[in-house]
Image (spheres, grey):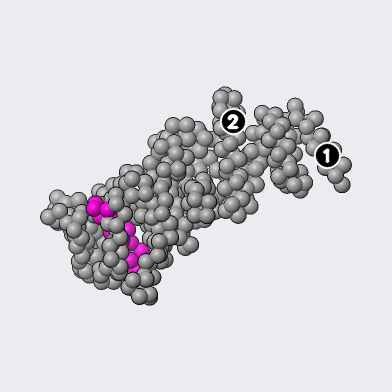
């Protein structure tokens, strides 16, 4: 996992100027109705974190190792160290809220939401913690998730993680730029969310999806991933469902569409589920995959099959006999 690049642009005009010729990470957040600018620099091999507003320094903190990642929000500043540490600071004064967390490899991406903190390390390790300052010092940190992003990276064809977020329930999501075969199946980018119960990364949106992802935060991830992957090929869904692409890799395409249906069902997104069922039905009808068509008909039930599966079969002249068979089966079951 590539680390987030240091911000090359100069800090805002109302931030305290950093020392010259130094690596710089910057972020900002709203605090007490004003914009608080936070920047991390390196001095004598150590991280120096400075927060300022309206050109005045508000606080200064240090860490033993240079900063590899930086984020802020929800009245907190999180610093990921090159020594594999994660420090969570009070945005108002720079004090450590809990002892430093050790994740082994240096953090590449950090994210915050309410009490939750997400860290994605350069070795693809993913950690989520819940931090509650109202509890006793030894009870403030709770491990929520510990997993690897490797399965999500495989979904993207070995692409790069270009963004990360954690939602109000502590569920981490990754925005990935696609490479290789994933470009033709998913477009330039894909978003995966981690399901702790299934211990699996679920694909919840990609550049070929015609419906919106299920949450605004995921929409933001997809937009960021698309922006950073804008120079890559973005094959359209129509391209996939026509010409040689279907005949070359039809089984993989059907498996991909079926996986999208399952993910939409698990996430409770009715509109996404209908979209992907229709696409899946069109793919099966074009192939004449009788076994899968029968299985999909049984799984959908009569109402959804009439609405989503039967139109796809009707659109394929060669499938009218199969469509008549399914309708006759429904009639006999009445």
State whether residue 112 is above or below residue 219: below
Specify the segment rendered in magenta. 70-84
Q: Where is residue 267 in the image (x, y as percent from the top left)?
A: 57, 53
Q: Mark 1 points at which residue?
A: 329
Give the quadrant of residue 170: bottom left
Q: Of residues 241 and 268, which is closer to you in this image? A: 268
Q: Position of residue 138 (x, y in %)?
A: 33, 71
| SS for dot 2 | helix
Q: Residue at horizontal 52%, vertical 55%?
A: 197
Q: Where is residue 240 in the image (x, y as percent from the top left)?
A: 56, 32
| SS for dot 1 | helix
Q: Give the side of residue 40 with respect to residue 188, left or right.
A: left
Tell me the quadrant of the picture where the N terminus can be found: top left
Find out whether residue 154 is within the magenta segment: no
Q: Name the residue under label 2.
A: 251
Give the quadrant of residue 36: bottom left
Q: Is the magenta stretch mostly helix, strand or loop?
A: strand
Q: Residue at horizontal 42%, vertical 51%?
A: 147
Instruction: Name, please, the residue furthest toward the front.
Output: 138
């Amino acid at each position: 996992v590539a680390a987030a690049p240091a911000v090359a642009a100069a800090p805002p005009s109302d931030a305290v100027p950093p020392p010259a010729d130094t690596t710089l990470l910057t972020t900002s957040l709203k605090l007490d109705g004003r914009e608080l600018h936070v920047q991390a620099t390196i001095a004598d091999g150590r991280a120096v974190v400075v927060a300022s507003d309206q050109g005045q320094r508000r606080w200064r903190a240090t860490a033993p190792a240079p900063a590899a990642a930086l984020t802020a929000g929800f009245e907190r500043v999180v610093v990921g160290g090159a020594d594999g540490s994660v420090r969570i600071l009070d945005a108002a004064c720079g004090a450590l809220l809990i002892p430093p967390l050790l994740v082994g490899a240096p953090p590449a991406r950090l994210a915050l939401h309410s009490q939750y903190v997400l860290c994605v390390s350069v070795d693809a390790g993913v950690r989520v913690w819940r931090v509650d300052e109202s509890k006793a010092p030894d009870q403030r940190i709770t491990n929520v998730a510990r997993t690897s992003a490797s399965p999500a990276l495989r979904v993207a064809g070995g692409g790069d993680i270009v963004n990360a977020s954690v939602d109000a329930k502590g569920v981490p999501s990754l925005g990935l730029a696609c490479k290789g075969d994933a470009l033709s199946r998913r477009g330039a980018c894909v978003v995966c969310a981690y399901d702790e119960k299934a211990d699996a990364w679920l694909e919840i949106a990609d550049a070929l999806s015609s419906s919106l992802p299920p949450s605004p935060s995921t929409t933001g991830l997809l937009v960021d991933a698309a922006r950073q992957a804008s120079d890559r090929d973005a094959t359209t869904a129509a391209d996939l469902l026509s010409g040689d692409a279907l005949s070359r890799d039809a089984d993989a395409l059907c498996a991909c569409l079926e996986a999208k249906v399952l993910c939409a069902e698990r996430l409770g997104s009715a509109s996404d589920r209908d979209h992907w069922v229709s696409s899946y039905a069109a793919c099966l009808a074009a192939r004449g995959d009788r076994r899968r068509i029968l299985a999909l008909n049984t799984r959908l039930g009569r109402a959804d099959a009439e609405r989503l599966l039967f139109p796809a079969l009707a659109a394929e002249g060669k499938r009218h006999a199969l469509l008549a068979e399914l309708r006759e089966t429904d009639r006999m079951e009445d």
